[in-house]
Structure formats: structure tokens, C-alpha cells
């Protein structure tokens, strides 16, 4: 796979995002295109990842799980970043759209993160000999995942839409802030204790497949988030409509 | 005499709790210098409206202006001028009556707090219980203490949510006198109560709420 | 305005002192909290068995876990007091600046945890055979920084979960993930005040602790008004 192919996929993806955001008339079909495109890209990824790419030098065929594991974690982090951006935006200026997008991105992010961490664990078993290890990426993703599971539970346990939006935004920001601190502290802990390096010097053709995987799952991320966002908006709309103006028969004379 | 700004102006105010509307598309204007009687059944939105006017919470839609100042934008300033006597006493159960009052005096930046607290306790007849924790108080005593808490503030606008509840007959008389005194001193009163006759004797305007909307009584 | 205003610092101090007063007046609850953490320490030593080497090695971890579990109780209690009679709303409309409430309550809770850790230390010496004489002042600093670090995000989470359903589960669910780096740093820093610090790692962990505290104090300071006000 030539290295420009993932780049082309990325450009298409960005174009879809721009269409969704900037061209209202395109909103009916963007998610369908993203879902269809994602399916095709996934088919290509299966071929490139399982057949075309040579086995990894140290990990042999086990290493192929990286082509889906890493993209899942990436999609998860992108989703959480969208979520925290929405949280900040909501606190600065109340808007039900940002709250709906926050809800959508958190839920989809937890989905990708859970699959990603699970696959990372499957990969770790034959590679490191353990299911779980003090790898900064693994730990910080898991911590984020836990924080967002708490976030979603909190959302479902708070009834009032306004308080839910404001409070969950605060919870999201506090959780996201921990990401770099967790990363840093675990890496540091590791470097002091000299555990094995995470050893993933990926060769060039493999890197192209990895990037292709990233594009594939980011395309799915787009489709999922749009769909989930529409669902959140539909749920909101019934709750957010103002009550009708008073009927004229109840004209008041004081 | 009358300042040009209405004391309270409700501008298409709605407030949602969960999935129901406690106050719905309410517009009303209370002229300066007049006091208001707020009536309606339980759950008609009286408490919510008072909480919004006191800046404890804010409308989901619409605007409230107090003496011309929008509650959301001018909350800091308004909170010095508006006081609320609510169902919830705002008291700390584990602190004594005197400690609760002193705390408020300190937050308000008042001087001569000891004397002030002593005189307020005297006024509400709780001097002998000054050092008992609120947890041991009866409902009526809590109400009295809550009144002292409100008086501490010397508000321009005082909101009373069911002030006569839980009070004995003597207490009700005292409360009526207090409301008259406040009005005589130039405080605008909003009184939410089921005791319509007593309320009408104390106020000039009336607003009747039904399911969060303005209705004929 | 015609009425005097008090400064943010003064208001924070008043909130802190109010929390101390309530703590003092409900010292029966405080005693229960202390015994809860003591029995946590004891349970760890039972769970590990009589291997004194292992106990000594893991003592910092047990100490911080005991504090962490106690903090869930103390943070929950801190806002139970405020939601009773809607006292928090009362403070906000008094008016007290929400940021002052945040600072006051963070340091109120932190001082409680710090005090608790001082009670736990001698018990840890007895149970785990640790040596406190190596760097006692640094140890106190670590305990203090750790207590502030638990309280800063804890107060915000406690404020939002106080009104949610299932609040007793919500608080740890939200709080614990965020505290992972703090736990790591506090346990490591504590360890190097107890055993020889061959690679000079202590300053690094202290810096991390301080950074964690400062980050969460500032984020909480900015966020708390949005949480405390029913906007």
C-alpha cells in the first residue's frame, strides 16, 4: 500500500466532516456515505492487514491486531476530545446542540475505547506474557474509559436536562484533564522501574496499513456520532419545546 | 416618588423541572412601591417563581428584571438587595442558632455582629436557645430563625414563601406586624400564601397562578 | 454598591471555619470516620498475612488507600451538610462567591484528611513496622499535598453527585479514575520518605503531586460556579 492512500482517505473524511458541519442540506446523506465508505475501507483493511502486510518481525501474526487495536484507541481519544470541547463550549455558551454532541461523542468514545482496550489486552498476552501491564498508553486509555463510564452513568442518573448538561460538562473536563497527568505519571513510573519498552517500531508498509486502519475507524466514528447525535437531538426536542402561549380565554383582569 | 422601574418584571418566563413546566410563559409587572400577593394551589409554581426572583435559580426561557436589573446578569448585585424566606430554611442543622446568624452577618460584611445577632435573637424570642443546635429546634423555631436570617440583610425586596405556615397564632400576628414594618420602611414585599384574606390585607396587588400560568383567582 | 463586600479570601476562610465548626460539633461522626480508616488498615494487614517484609513494602499503598476510602465518606458528608435545608443555595444567594465556597470546602476537607493521616501514621508504624524518622517533615508535606489533591477534584464531584440518584456510588465512580495519578505519586513519594531513596526520585514525585494539586485547584476554581449555581 502506497503511503498516499491513507492520506487520500483522510482527505475524503475531512471533506465529509466539513460537509456535515457547513452544508445543512448534506446532513441527510453524510452519515450514509460515511458508513458505506467505512465498510469498503474495512474490507480493504482486512486484505491489507491480514494478507498484504508481512508478519511483524518480533510478534509474527499476533502483531496484526495492532491494525485494528490502535485505530480504535485513536477513535476513542478523538471522540473524548470532541466531548470535552463540547463541554467547554456548553459552559461558555449554553446550547443544546453541544450537549447532544457531548452525549453522542462520549457514548461512541466509550464503545471504541472498550473494544480498543480489550484488543490491547489480547495483544499484550502473547507479546508481554501478561493480560495487563504498566504501559502508559494502556493505563491512560483505561483511566479515560473509566472516567467516561462514570460520566455516562452520571448523565443517566440526573433527570433535569439543564443540570445534567452543566454538571456532566464539569465532570468531563475534570476527567479529561487527568489524561496527560496519568500518561506522564505512568511513563515516569515505568522509566524508573525499567519495565520492558513497549517496542513497536513499526516498519514502513505496516505504518501505511496502520494509518489506513485509523482512517477506516475514524470514518466509522463520524457515521456513529452523527447518528447518535441525531438520536440525542430527537430526545431533546420533545423536552425542550416551550409550552404554548396562554390561551386567550384566560385573559386576566386584576 | 415612584421610581420609573417596576419592582419586578416578568417577561415571558418559563421554568422547567425535569420534563414538566413549573412556570409557563408568565408575564407580569409589579409597579415599584406596591406589594404583591401570590396565590395558587400547591404545585402551581409559586415557589419556583419566588426562587427565580431571588436568583436562587434562573428561568429556562424569558427574563426577569428586578428594579430594572436582569437577574442572570446582575445576580451579584441583586443578591444584596433581595432576600428569600423559603420552605428550605438554609440553616445548618449542626450549628447553633447564634452561629448560624453570626455566619450570615460575617458573609454580609456587617459590623458589630455580636450585638446585631443578640438583638435579632431577642426580637424573634430565641435568646434562651441561642446556643442550642438547630437540629433540636421545632418547626416554628426554625421559621423564626429563618426570619432573623432574612432581616439581617435589610433587603429592598423581601420574598416570603408561606411565612405563616408552622407558626402559632401569636407567631402569625408577629409575622403580620413584621411584614407591615418592612413595608413601612420601604421594602417591597412578595407574599405567597394560602391565607388569602390575611394576605390581601397586607398587599396591594395579586397574582394568581395555576399550573405555572396566570389565572383569575 | 451600598453594602460592604468581603474579599474572596475572607469568604473562603469563613466557609472553611464553618466546616470546621460543623466538624467539631459532629465529632461523633468524625470518630466513626477515624475508626473506619483504622479498620481498613487493619484489614489490609490481615489480608496480606503475617509477612512483615511485604507489609512494610506496601505500607504506603495501604495508607493511601485507607485515606482514599475515608475521603469518599468525608466528601459525601461535606455536601450532605450543604444539601440539608438547601444550605448551599442559601450560601449562594446570601451572597457568597461560589469560588470561595470551593476553596473553603477543599481546604476544609483536605485538613480533615490530613488530620486523619496523622492519626493513621502511628497505627501504620505498629501494624506495618515502618520507620518514620527518615524524613518526617517531607512525609508531612506529602500527606498534605495528597490530601489537597484528593479534595480539589473531590469537592466538585461531590457537589454534582450530591443531587444525582445513587449518589453514594456516583462519587467514587467519578472520582477514582481521576485520582489514579495522584495515588501513584503520593504512594511513591511516601515510599521514598520511608526507605532509602537511592535514585533521588522523591523530588520528582513531589513536583508531580504539586502539579496535580495546582491543576485541579485551578480547574475546580473555574468550574465550581457553574456547578453551584442552578443556572
Image: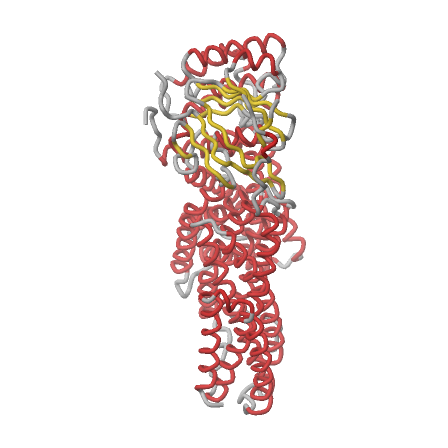
State whether residue C181 is above or below residue C116: below
Residue B43 spot, x, y in % from top left: 64, 30
The quarter of the image holding the N terminus of chain C is top left
In this view, the residue farthest toward the front is: A249
State whether residue B89 is above or below residue C136: above
Residue B44 spot, x, y in % from top left: 62, 30
Q: Position of A49 compared to B118: left or right?
A: right
Q: Position of A152 compared to A9: left or right?
A: right
Give residue A48's quadrant in the image. Answer: bottom right
State whether residue B201 is above or below residue B31: above
In depth, the one of A207 and A167 nearer the eye is A167
Q: Is the image coloured rainbow, by chain, by secondary structure, or in one colour?
A: secondary structure
Give residue A184's quadrant in the image. Answer: bottom left
The total number of labels drawn is 0
Asked whether the viewer can see residue C194, the reply is: no
Residue at image location 45% in from the left, 29% down from the top: B9
Residue A114 spot, x, y in % from top left: 61, 67
Residue at image location 57% in from the left, 56% down from the top: A233
Residue A81 spot, x, y in % from top left: 48, 63
Asked whether the viewer can see residue C217, the reply is: yes
Amino acid at each position: 500500500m502506497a503511503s498516499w492512500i491513507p492520506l487520500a482517505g483522510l482527505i475524503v473524511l475531512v471533506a465529509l466532516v466539513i460537509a456535515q458541519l457547513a452544508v445543512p442540506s448534506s446532513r441527510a446523506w453524510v452519515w450514509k456515505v460515511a458508513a458505506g465508505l467505512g465498510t469498503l475501507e474495512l474490507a480493504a483493511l482486512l486484505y491489507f492487514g491480514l494478507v498484504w502486510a508481512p508478519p511483524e518481525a518480533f510478534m509474527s501474526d499476533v502483531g496484526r491486531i495492532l491494525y485494528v487495536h490502535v485505530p480504535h484507541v485513536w477513535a476513542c481519544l478523538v471522540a473524548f476530545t470532541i466531548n470535552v470541547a463540547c463541554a467547554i463550549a456548553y459552559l461558555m455558551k449554553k446550547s443544546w446542540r453541544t450537549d447532544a454532541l457531548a452525549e453522542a461523542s462520549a457514548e461512541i468514545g466509550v464503545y471504541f475505547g472498550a473494544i480498543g482496550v480489550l484488543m490491547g489486552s489480547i495483544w499484550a498476552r502473547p507479546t508481554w506474557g501478561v493480560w495487563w501491564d504498566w504501559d502508559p498508553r494502556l493505563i491512560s486509555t483505561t483511566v479515560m474509559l473509566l472516567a467516561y463510564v462514570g460520566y455516562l452513568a452520571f448523565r443517566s442518573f440526573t433527570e433535569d436536562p439543564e443540570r445534567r448538561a452543566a454538571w456532566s460538562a464539569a465532570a468531563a473536563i475534570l476527567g479529561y484533564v487527568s489524561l496527560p497527568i496519568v500518561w506522564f505519571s505512568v511513563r515516569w513510573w515505568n522509566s524508573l522501574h525499567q519495565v520492558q519498552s513497549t517496542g513497536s517500531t513499526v516498519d514502513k508498509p505496516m505504518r501505511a496499513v496502520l494509518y489506513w486502519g485509523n482512517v477506516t475507524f475514524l470514518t466509522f466514528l463520524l457515521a456513529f456520532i452523527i447518528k447518535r447525535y441525531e438520536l440525542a437531538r430527537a430526545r431533546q426536542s420533545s423536552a425542550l419545546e416551550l409550552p404554548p402561549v396562554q390561551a386567550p380565554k384566560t385573559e386576566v383582569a386584576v | 416618588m415612584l421610581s420609573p422601574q417596576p419592582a419586578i418584571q416578568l417577561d415571558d418566563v418559563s421554568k422547567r423541572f425535569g420534563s414538566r413546566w413549573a412556570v409557563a410563559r408568565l408575564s407580569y409587572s409589579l409597579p415599584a412601591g406596591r406589594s404583591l400577593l401570590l396565590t395558587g394551589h400547591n404545585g402551581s409554581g409559586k415557589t419556583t417563581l419566588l426562587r427565580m426572583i431571588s436568583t436562587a435559580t434562573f428561568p429556562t426561557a424569558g427574563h426577569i428584571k428586578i428594579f430594572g436589573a436582569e437577574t442572570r446578569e446582575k445576580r451579584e448585585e441583586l443578591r444584596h438587595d433581595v432576600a428569600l424566606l423559603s420552605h428550605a430554611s438554609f440553616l445548618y442543622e449542626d450549628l447553633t442558632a447564634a452561629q448560624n446568624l453570626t455566619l450570615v452577618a460575617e458573609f454580609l460584611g456587617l459590623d458589630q455582629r455580636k450585638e446585631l445577632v443578640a438583638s435579632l435573637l431577642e426580637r424573634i424570642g430565641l435568646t434562651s436557645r441561642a446556643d442550642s443546635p438547630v437540629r433540636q429546634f421545632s418547626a416554628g423555631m426554625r421559621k423564626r430563625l429563618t426570619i432573623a436570617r432574612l432581616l439581617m440583610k435589610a433587603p429592598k425586596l423581601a420574598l416570603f414563601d408561606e411565612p405563616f405556615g408552622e407558626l402559632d397564632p401569636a407567631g402569625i400576628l408577629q409575622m403580620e406586624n413584621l411584614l407591615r414594618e418592612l413595608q413601612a420602611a420601604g421594602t417591597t414585599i412578595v407574599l405567597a400564601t394560602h391565607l388569602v384574606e390575611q394576605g390581601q390585607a397586607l398587599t396591594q396587588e395579586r397574582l394568581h397562578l395555576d399550573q405555572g400560568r396566570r389565572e383569575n383567582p | 454598591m451600598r453594602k460592604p463586600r468581603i474579599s474572596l479570601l475572607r469568604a473562603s476562610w469563613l466557609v472553611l471555619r464553618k466546616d470546621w465548626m460543623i466538624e467539631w460539633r459532629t465529632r461523633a461522626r468524625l470518630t466513626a470516620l477515624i475508626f473506619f480508616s483504622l479498620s481498613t488498615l487493619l484489614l489490609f494487614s490481615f489480608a496480606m498475612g503475617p509477612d512483615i517484609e511485604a507489609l512494610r513494602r506496601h505500607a504506603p499503598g495501604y495508607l493511601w488507600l485507607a485515606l482514599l476510602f475515608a475521603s469518599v465518606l468525608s466528601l459525601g458528608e461535606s455536601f450532605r451538610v450543604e444539601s440539608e435545608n438547601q444550605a448551599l443555595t442559601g450560601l449562594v444567594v446570601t451572597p457568597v462567591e461560589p469560588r470561595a465556597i470551593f476553596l473553603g470546602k477543599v481546604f476544609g476537607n483536605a485538613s480533615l484528611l490530613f488530620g486523619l493521616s496523622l492519626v493513621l501514621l502511628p497505627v501504620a508504624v505498629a501494624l506495618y513496622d515502618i520507620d518514620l524518622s527518615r524524613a518526617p517533615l517531607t512525609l508531612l508535606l506529602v500527606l498534605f499535598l495528597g490530601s489537597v489533591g484528593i479534595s480539589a477534584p473531590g469537592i466538585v464531584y461531590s457537589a454534582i453527585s450530591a443531587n444525582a440518584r445513587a449518589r453514594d456510588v456516583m462519587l467514587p465512580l467519578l472520582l477514582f479514575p481521576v485520582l489514579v495519578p495522584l495515588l501513584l505519586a503520593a504512594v511513591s513519594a511516601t515510599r521514598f520518605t520511608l526507605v532509602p531513596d537511592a535514585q533521588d526520585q522523591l523530588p520528582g514525585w513531589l513536583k508531580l503531586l504539586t502539579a496535580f494539586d495546582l491543576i485541579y485547584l485551578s480547574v475546580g476554581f473555574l468550574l465550581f460556579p457553574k456547578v453551584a449555581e442552578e443556572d
